[in-house]
Image: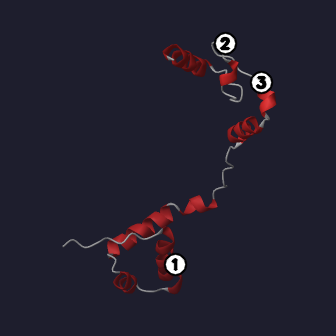
Amino acid sequence: MKKQRKHYTPEEKVAMLRRRLLERVPISELCDKQRLQPTVFYRWQKEFFENGAAAFQPKAQPNHSAEQERIAYLEKPAEKWGPQTCAGHSHWLAFFPFGGSEPMNAALRRLHSVL
């Protein structure tokens, strides 16, 4: 039967690295306790030091402007939208803000022709 692999979280990996680097716990002891191959530990250590500079990079501010515009548009009162027309049936789209879009109009025309 094949042995199940343990997947360590980033927090667990850092905790093991911290014990090694700050508390000077021998790698053999850490690996025996965690049932971890030393080569895996050394790979984690290498990745940790190679990516360490990322911790000191300025955090990028997410661009929420597109999402904020969408929210503002959807929060507009229905009376400001006004009735939209499609093949002479304004009542179908009176409360939909996207009703005036050309793809939607084409889809409704196809639906109307089937009905």
Foreground of the two, 68 or 22: 68
Label 2 is placed on what type of residue? Gly
Location of residue 37 with respect to 63 vertically, above or below? below
Mark 3 or 2: in front is 2
The residue at 54%/63% (across/down) is 52
Image position of 30 (left or right of 71): left
Foreground of the two, 30 or 76: 76
Furthest residue in direction front, as rendered: 115
The residue at 57%/60% (across/down) is 53
**Which residue position is annotated with label 1?**
18
Q: Residue 72: x, y in percent?
A: 76, 38
Image position of 8 (left or right of 96): left
**Upstream in sequence: badge 1 or badge 3:** 1
Label at residue 77: none
Q: Quadrant of residue 107?
A: top right
- Per the model, the C-alpha gap separating discs 2 and 1 is 71 Å
At numbered mark 1, what does the secondary structure look like: helix, strand or loop? helix
- Per the model, the C-alpha gap separating discs 3 and 2 is 15 Å
Label 3 is placed on what type of residue? Gly
Mark 1 or 3: in front is 3
**Which residue position is annotated with label 2?**
88
Label at residue 82: 3
**Upstream in sequence: badge 2 or badge 1:** 1
